[in-house]
Image (cartoon, rainbow, N blue to C red):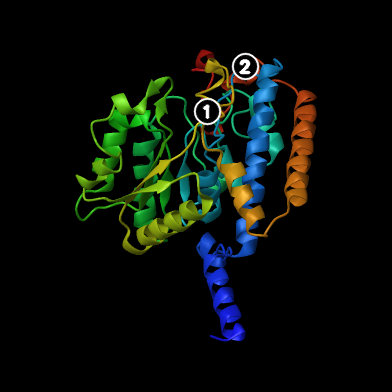
Amino acid sequence: MSKKTTKASAKSKAVKKAAPKKTKTDFGGLSDDLLLKFHNLMVKSRVLEERLIKIYKAGEGYFWIGGPGEEAFGVPLGLLAKKGQGLEHDWLHLHYRCTPTMVALGMPMLDAARLMMNRSTDPSTGGRNFAGHYCFPKWNVAPVTSPIEVQYPLACGTAHAQKRAGHKAISIVTGGDAGTAEGDFATCLVWASRKGQELPVLITVQNNGFGISTPYDGQHGETQIADRAKAFNIRSRVINGNDPVEAYLSLKEEMDYIRKTGKPSFVEVKVSRLYGHSSADGANRKTELVDPVHAFEKRLIDAGLLTKAEALKIWEEYEEEGVLAQQQARTEPAPTAESVWENVFVGSENADWRKF
């Protein structure tokens, strides 16, 4: 064997042993711009949530509950929704861990801070509800409620109206795993799946493994929550909610299916609960859990789509925006006692019981 042949053979073996380079296929064929948009909005949502926790711990808010750990699911969901007002647009019936979705829809940090600090300028509730309880009629975001899972049958209501209107719009509902024990959840499965009268609703459950302080494993007899949809002949799947690429591609596929067929789809999303249930259990960081924001940021850096310096700048810019939002909200008024009667009924008609 010649020296030239030996060198060529050695080179061939070296190529085979070398680690494969990152390619577009690692990100499902999604564009660089979209991947970087995922990261940007995920960072914004995380910085906002951590700012809200700081507001609570500083005594400028009464209670915090939110979605750190759900960014890789919530951001793609917000980007995929057909945003707008009216039956030709998607309706969103969200639960109180929906900040990532709201950020993706375009909610400013300031509006979240106003709600957290109970300011009358809060566009969702006029400063009269908990953190994360958003309501944006201009985007068909129905009021987030404190009683769990009541949003599920409500989603069937808007889906029914959308089906009659025929605009190919869908209703989207999100909730936690513990709430699937509620009758409202079962009602949604029944009404969404009646033969010949199926509804265009995307039913999602964010399974973070806990219901307040109760572990998931001791409460569910089914293997996966998504298995429950099978009894109603509802198409279902389980996805990794800590990966924005998988979440985006899976949600898009299901939403396209619903728009095309007018039938429901069920998605169970495995996510992390990084700061506990709420401020009621301290809102302290759980370092042992997967952090979807930092994990995705590392993937982008390793793939050469983002540098550490660029990532740091994004974090710093949103941290500055969060501080300014808190400072601005601090200067704004709290709701007055008289305003408690406002927005109870349409046009405030007969809102004050003393004037009945």
**For residue 156, which numbered disc appears in the image?**
none
Q: Amino acid at mark 1?
A: Glu
Would you place residue 270 above or below residue 13 in this image?
A: above
Q: Position of residue 257 (x, y in %)?
A: 36, 61
Numbered disc 1: secondary structure:
loop
Would you place residue 119 above or below residue 196 in this image?
A: above
Question: Mark 1 or mark 2: which comes first in sequence?
Answer: 2
Q: In the displayed orientation, state which residue is furthest to the front.
A: 1
Question: Is there any visible trace of residue 107 in the rendered image?
Answer: no
Badge 2: residue crowd in 10 Å (few <14, some 14–19, many ≥20): some
Question: Is there any visible trace of residue 17 in the rendered image?
Answer: yes
Would you place residue 162 above or below residue 8 in this image?
A: above
Near-viewer residue (62 or 309) = 309
Q: For residue 306, which quarter of the picture?
A: bottom right
Q: Position of residue 2 (x, y in %)?
A: 58, 86
Q: For residue 53, which quarter of the picture?
A: top right
Which residue is found at the position 67% from the left and 59% from the top? 305
Q: Amino acid at mark 2?
A: Tyr
Q: Position of residue 211 (x, y in %)?
A: 40, 25
Near-viewer residue (254 or 261) = 254
Tag 2 residue: 62
Numbered disc 2: secondary structure:
loop
Q: CA distance from mark 1 to mark 2?
A: 30 Å
Which residue is found at the position 65% from the left and 62% from the top? 33
Q: Is 350 placed left or right of 151 in the picture?
A: right
Would you place residue 36 above or below residue 116 in this image?
A: below
Tag 1 residue: 349
Q: Nearer the viewer, mark 1 or mark 2?
A: 2
Q: Is 338 placed left or right of 274 in the picture?
A: right
Total tally of numbered discs in the picture = 2
Q: Is 267 placed left or right of 62 in the picture?
A: left
